[in-house]
Structure formats: C-alpha cells, structure tokens
Amino acid sequence: MSSATVQVAPALEADLVALGFSRILRAHDAEQLAALVATADPADRVAVIDAGFVGHRHALRLALTDPRFPAAAVPGAVVVSGAQARTALASAAHRLTAHGPTAEPRLPHQRGTAPRAAERSTDRSTESSTDQSTDRSTEPYGPQPLPDVLAGELAHHGIPVQRPELGTLVATVPANETELQAARAAVAEVDEEAVRLRRAVKARDGFFTTFCVSPYSRYLARWCARRGLTPNQVTTASLLVALLAAGCAATGTRPGFIAAGVLLLASFVLDCTDGQLARYSLQYSTVGAWLDATFDRCKEYAFYAGLALGAARTGDHVWALSLAAMVLMTFRHSVDFAFMAADQDTARNPVTPGGPAKSTNSSPTAQLSSRLDRVGWTVWARRIIVLPIGERWALIALLTAVTTPRITLTVLLVGCALACCYTTAGRVLRSVTRRRPRGDQAAHEVATLADGGPLAELLAPVLRPVARRLPALAVPVLAALAAAGLPAAVYLSAGTWQAVAAAGGYVLLSALVLARKLNGSLDWLAPAFFRAGEYLTVLALALRLDTGALPAAFGLVAAVAYHHYDTVYRLRGGTGAPAGWLVRAAGGQEGRALLVTLVAALAYTGSPVGPVGHQIAGADVLQGLLVALAAVLALVVVAESIHFWVFGDATAEHDESGDTA
C-alpha cells in the first residue's frame, strides 16, 4: 500500500495516485511531519512533497518511484526508503523543529540537472510508499520549501541523495502568482510523453543500436508498459527467442540459418526493449540487472553452440572455432572488467550536481580520448571499431543467414580479435601514462577477478618474499608467460605426466603473481591472461587428444565463464567477492587447470598414442570426465548464484555506460 500526507490540488493528487500513492496525508509543520514518518509502515517509501509543487508527473516519477536509491529529490519533493534513510528524515524534521536547518540545500527550482540514473535492468521492487507533503505557506523555512531543506539536511548528515536529471522537465514550487503562471506555461510547453520516450533510450550506445533499433524499440517498450509487462518478462522472452535461434542454426539447413539470423536480431531488439522498459516505467531490480547481464552471455554462447551443431550436420566440424570465439569474447570482457576495476576511482568518480564531470585519470591518453569525444564522427567510428553487442550480433545474424557457420565464426574471430587489440592497446596506454596511483580497493578487486584458488592461497605466503622483490612489470609478464606456456605444453604433451608437470609450473606462477598486491600500472592484465590460460588449456587438450571431446570442453569452459562473469557482476554491484567456500569449491583458475591436465593423464594412463584428434583408447573416459566436471561445476556455481541474487541482499549495477558488452 502507498500513502501520503497533504492537502493538495486535484492535479497533484491525481499524479500521486498514478504514481502509486494511495494514502495522502497532511503535515502542517516539521514536528507533525516527524510524527507521521514515525507511524508509517516500515515497508513504505516515504515522500515529502510541497503542496504548492508544480511540474511534470514524470519529474516526480523519476524522484519518488526509483527503487535503486535510499533517498532522492527534485525541487519541491524528497523521498526516502529503508530504515536508515527514514530515521535520518525523522531526525532532520526534529532538528528543523528545534534549531532550523544546518545546511543550505542547493537545488534549482525549475529545470534541473544532476547525475543520471538509468540502466539496462528490470523489475521495480514492490514497495509501497508514504508521501508526506507540506504547505509552504505555513512553514518558517524562509524562501525554500520544506522538502528542499530536508534534502539538504539528509545530504549534510551522510545520506546520499540522488538528484535525477530533469532536462526539459519542470519541477518547482512557485513563490508568487507570477512564478506560478510561468511554471504552468513551462509545463505546457513540454511534450512529457516524448521526453519520457527519449529518456527510455540509453544516452550512450552503439551505432547499430542507436540508429537501427532504438528508434522503434522504445515504442515497443511503451506498448509493453501499457500492457503490464515487466522488464524481467521481456528479458526472459529475449532469451527464449535467442535459444530458438540457436535451435534453428543447429538444423544445419539454409532455411534454418536464415530463420536463426532473423530470430537473433529479434532477440536483440527485445534485449534493448527490456532496458528501455525499465527506464520508461522505472522498474528496476537487482534480479533484473543480473538476468539482463547473464542472459546476454548465455544467448551469444548458446548461438555459437548452435552454429557448431548445425555445421556438424553438414559434415563440417567447427566446435574448435565456437570454443575459440567464446574464449576470445571472455578474454576481451576480462580486459574490460579488470581495467574498470583497476581504474575505478575514475570510472566511478561521482559528478557533482550541476557541475562538470571530474576525472581522476589525467593521463595524456585519457585527455586525448576526451578531446576526440567532442568530434562527432570519431565517436561513432570508435564505437563501431570496438564491435559492441549490437554490431556483433548484426554481423553474426547476417553471416549466419547468407554464409556457413565456419565463415561466420572465422569472421567473428577476426573482427573480435582486432577490436580486442584496439581496446586493450588504448587501455594499456592509459595505464602506463596514468599519474595517479591505484588504491587498495582497486588492487583487491583485481585480485578477486584473478580467481586464485586454494592452491594459490596456500602457496602465496611462502612466495610473498620473492614476489615483493620482483620488478614492477613482473605481474603481467609472468601471467602472460603462464597463459601462453601451459596451453602450448598441453597441446604438445596432452595426456602425459609432462603436461601435469607443466600445470604444476602454472600453479607456481599463478601463486607468485597473486602473492603481490596487484596495484601496478599493468597488473590488471593478469585476470585476462589467467582466463586465456585456463580456457585455452581446455581447448588444446581436446584438440590434441580427441576432437570428439570439444563439445564437452565447450560446456566446461561455459560453466567456468559463468562463474567469472558472476564474480564481475558482484563486484560491480558493490556486494564484494564471492564467498570463500565457493571459490575453494570451484578450485580457482590454477586448480582447475591442474585438474583437467591430471584428468587427461589419468584417462590415457600418461601415454596417449595415435594422431592428433584420433579416437583412441581413453577418449571415451576423457569425454565422460569433462562432462562430469562441467556438470558439477555448473551445478555448484549456478545454484549458488541464483540463491545469492534472488534470495540474498545483493545489489546489481544497472549499466548506462554504453560500453561494449
């Protein structure tokens, strides 16, 4: 249930009811307001609105109904949710009654600007709300409405107050008749629905999404909103359509490939629609953000598997290409995520409301990038070069429809490799010219992304004295050597005890890297190198011993990749690293690399014979063991992940960056 406290004009009351405020009360002063806040249902969102508020309903919606923030405000209105913010609101009202305001809030009283808040996510939490509003004419708070004073008090006492960007939307409390008429005229000038539709689209996105999808998908989002569909439902529909596309590709027929391409594009349209629906109706939720991010990876990698199955029906075996594509995409994302974690003081640096953005990365490369952003055509060229999800899926859909799976995957590998080189080179340049040292939090997150397991944890204290004496670039160099050395050794000697010995060396190098604090200029490359080392080891093992084991290897890498992506989403959502027991149960990247080489040696009793990829004795055992490893790992990490996101107190970051996905 929602409730509110004020005698308001019918138009404002109608807006509040439309926004879910079913109980409207009146507080004559701050003392009465404090009493009303104390009696509100703990599950409610508590909003305070000036009775003289004039503005657009969507301006109120942006502040009062967004569940992501403990407090939010626009001129003339403030809202809180949660015990801490509610207690702070009641305390602020008591202080105003006794002493008057302690901080002067600085809020524009008309068309306002502040940090943005929106992301590709999903359902709004079903919280009821209590709205408590005051008549400014009875309040002794000078020229400022009581809600604005309360917002300033909240911020002054440590409660972060989100101030949504209003743009052309109006939110004000007129002080006299002249201002009232001007405010009403300003409201009438703006097409509120057009603004709402425009704001539903991510401000920064890829070329294909911006010009080929968003112009019509926003209307699909509105259609879904008017029929009561939630972003989570649209996200699930997108997954189902993508899985159907993968199934069509698996038929191996030209009509199936054409249908697969069309359905993959339809899935991407729905993928854009879910985020636009969330922004249009402000239906955000932790589960929605997690589903949206996780399903994107599931859809793409399932389609790779569908292409491999379809090719196999025509006698062409491309499982190695499919697995290589998944390895490359995961490596690329690991570079992106680890760099953002290492550079978090820049990436997550808050913007002062109404003020310019501040970047703590003042490197020449970052400054050049900022200057290029002011040249329109370079922005789009750079966004296309990095081959973001829209361009990538469009390329996959087109090539699937008109060519073969082998050509599709080969072109994808080449394009993604070039994009990966471009983005990685830019980030390396930013890092080596960076003037600000990285903090302990950044080092901790990079270490978490490196996914060291119990073996590295056991060896790190022993190796730490050696690690501390290593030169500055030792971390990326050692990680790169490990990532290149183990797959090469496995390909040359898979199934032998020599390969197991090489894996032992990989464990030592991993532990040596993780024994250091990863705050060096290029230490953030270590997680990506470890991803490549582990995944390529599985690929090399299957290629060398038994190509029939490639589907099982694909499944094993997919299960591990899920665990790694889930770790990223936890860190980006501010919930910290996965539980220690989960990391130990999963074995860590060095433990799994050792395990798969040991499994292969046991399957072939340490001495495989026969040409590369030939089905020989031990092949069936290898396939069975890889399937078992994939199944057990998937069961553990997926079950724990679902419990964490759905039943825990997790939060998720709702991405509005427009960065490559």
Image (cartoon, rainbow, N blue to C red):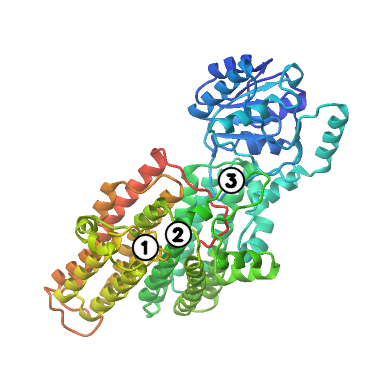
Give the mark toward the camera: 2 or 3.
2
Indicate the secondary structure of the residue bearing disc 3: helix
Label 3 crowd (10 A; few <14 / some 14-19 / many >=20): many
**How far apart in space, not on screen, are marks 1 and 2 (Cα)?**
9 Å
Indicate the secondary structure of the residue bearing disc 2: helix
Indicate the secondary structure of the residue bearing disc 1: helix
**Residue 70 seen in the current view:** yes
Give the mark toward the camera: 3 or 1.
1
Q: Residue furthest bottom?
A: 611
Query: Horizontal and vertical percent for residue 605?
Result: 11, 73
Query: Horizontal and vertical percent for residue 393?
Result: 53, 67
Q: Which amino acid does label 1 sit on?
A: Pro
Q: Mark 1 points at which residue?
A: 527
Q: Name the residue under label 3.
A: 278
| Residue at x 36% of width, y 63% of height | 527
Would you say the residues marked 1 and 2 are in contact, meaning their CB atoms lie under 8 Å apart? yes
Label 1 crowd (10 A; few <14 / some 14-19 / many >=20): many
* Of the image marks 3 and 1, the number of the one nearer the N terminus: 3
Is 287 on the left-hand or right-hand side of 507? right
